[in-house]
Amino acid sequence: MGAYADLHRRSITDRESFWIEEARRIHWQRRFDQVLDYSRPPFARWFVGGLTNLCYNALDRHLAARGDQPALVYISTETDSEVTYTYRELHTVVNVMAALIAAQGVSRGDRVLLYMPMIPEAVIAMLACARLGAVHSVVFGGFAAASCATRIDDAKPKLLITADAGLRAGRAIHYKPLVDEALRLAQYPPQRVLVVNRGIDAGFKPVAGRDLDYATLAREHAGAQVPVTWLESSEPSYILYTSGTTGKPKGVQRDTGGYAVALASSMERIYGGKPGETMFTTSDVGWVVGHSYIVYGPLIHGMTTILYEGLPIRPDAGIWWKIVADKKVSVMFSSPTAARVLKKQDPAYLKKYDLSSLRHLFLAGEPLDEPTHRWLHDALGKPVIDHYWQTETGWPILSLAPGVEPAQVKYGSPGFPVYGYDLKLLRESDASEAAPNEKGVVIIAPPLPPGCMTTVWGDDARFVDTYFRTFPGRLLYSTFDWGVRDADGYTFILGRTDDVINVAGHRIGTREIEEAVQSHANIAEVAVVGVADSLKGQMPLAFAVVKDVSKIETEAGRATQEQEIMAAVDRQLGGIARPSRVLFVTLLPKTRSGKLLRRSLQALAEGRDPGDLTTIEDPAALEQIRHALST
Ligand code: ATP
Ligand code: MG
């Protein structure tokens, strides 16, 4: 057995002793009493009773040995500036930020919402919250006011931190008016808004009594020293909302101790980074990748991290490689999208700079197609490692681990299950294990390893119902992705189990359309599927269960209801998402576990065999669907 396979096996069969060893990588103010409390499945509590703090592990712990080493290097091709903070300097400014946040009445467990561009103050504010034991929730700067407002109402923050503006390709995006609008829309707006005024928005107007100026307060709190608030390992460090690709965003809640251990471990074992070296992650602090591998991971590991504000092709497509050369980056982390952008540029840029410091380039976030993988690998002459993860997990699920064993890349595959993850590919029909080369649902047998989400913020039931109900009677975490494993054990991700409809090239989630249809007052339940269409590729078709059946008794009544529903979809999503028809039924075909038989519905709508229906709750539902389709 190879070194990695052996490590993975130990992490599953000898879970507790494996993680005791890994937990030595971080500072514990008080040692934990118990490695894992799994008395209430699927809720896992790691390192129970241990006291620690993310900010202490990221900064204070390194002061003695690395005080003068750069911790954060901010490079902006938008403002043409570069600022370096040593560990000592970053520690100083984080203390000041923590002092002025605390002065607003924020303490342990309180939420602070960040809506920030890629500037040092975003990182500083995250670390300051962590120092205070406050729960940060970073909302990607670029979300619309309405999206920001729903996240405010869910997190109910005491304080919001923002900036006057962000920059993209030299154009200012004014954040403040967006935040003002979000606060108008929100039901639970925070009382105070801390604004980092970059001097970009000349028309910037603070709201008296609400908005605070960061520079002014920082002067007032200069030299402040804020003691670390020690948190019990399971206390939340942050909330991060999922991208919402497949429905209403969920507040992913992360613990403190498990997360710190998972990151510290992955920095060495997966990313192969060494303390004192430099990591360059091209993501945004608003995404999970930014949380884990721009901010916390590299700092906990004593590395220098690069915060890059700008595009990959401005001033030219060599900018990232120039940064790698200038800063002697040893680990780089980017996305397939960025790789595809660079692929369209002159390949000479990849040869222009000395990339000898770089050992590996990691990519994640979406499927990496084989041609792009191969191209980048060849062009760089370095291993390009596709790895697979989710906001929910906080660190990779599938990857190669060059820190354990040299990486044998297979194009198109994110590699092997990461240690700690008991990953399986299961047949959708009966939850049995798929054979090699047979497609299955990617699931993780709980307990989820340290670092993964511990619950949905404020909604334990939603955590269980959303993630652990895919297979009736079996408590298994579903990733909602399809995967396949080849004979060598490499896993390939085939896409999401949540269907997406492709209407004339526009990808629209079936769930989004269902939500829009559902907003009509008379709709109790609805299922939307994509049906093949010779002109548009696919068209959405809705099957709706109404509350008041008297409204659909006549032909005219049905037509009116259908028109109203279509208008609701138009209003919320635009005409492109409008169902071709709305068919009324009293029952939808579901499994005994309550899962909609979406694929069967789609097959019937396209005149195909509905497939395996052994798990159907009530076969009468199918007759209704057939009848409705024939009208
Ligand atoms: P939501 O969960 O709200 O619908 P989302 O799933 O888009 O949003 P993320 O957590 O950012 O939010 O994305 C994780 C998903 O991205 C994975 O479930 C998978 O579908 C896809 N993904 C991530 N990395 C890879 C990869 N290396 N290869 C293939 N797909 C990937
Ligand atoms: Mg997801």
Image (cartoon, helix red, strand yellow):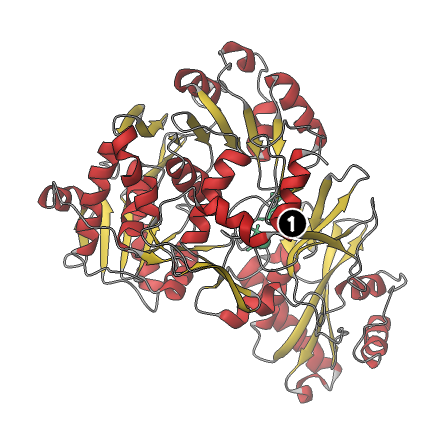
Q: Nearer the viewer, residue 156 or 54?
A: 54
Residue at 85% x, 65% y: name it.
604
Circle 1 residue: 507
Say whether mark 1 is within 8 Å of ligand 1: no
Residue at 21% x, 53% y: name it.
101
Classify residue 511 as left or right of residue 284: right
> Which percent across, then down, holds residue 571?
54, 63
Q: Quadrant of the C terminus?
A: bottom right
Classify residue 38 as left or right of residue 196: right
Crowd around label 1: few <14 · some 14–19 · many ≥20 (10 Å): some
Residue at 54% x, 22% y: name it.
359
For mark 1, give the secondary structure: strand
Q: Is residue 95 above or below residue 342?
A: below
Number of disc labels:
1
> Which percent across, then down, holds residue 51?
34, 56
Q: Is residue 369 above or below residue 433?
A: above
> Which percent across, then down, holds residue 605?
82, 64
Q: Quadrant of residue 530?
A: bottom right
Q: Quadrant of residue 565?
A: bottom right
User: Does residue 86 appear in this view?
Assistant: no
Residue at 9% x, 45% y: name it.
220
Q: Nearer the viewer, residue 112 or 584?
A: 112
Q: Quadrant of the N terminus?
A: top right
Outermost residue toward the left in this view: 220
Identify which amino acid the numbered label 1 is placed on. Arg
User: Does residue 383 appear in this view?
Assistant: yes
Classify residue 442 as left or right of residue 67: right
> Which percent across, then down, holds residue 328?
43, 18
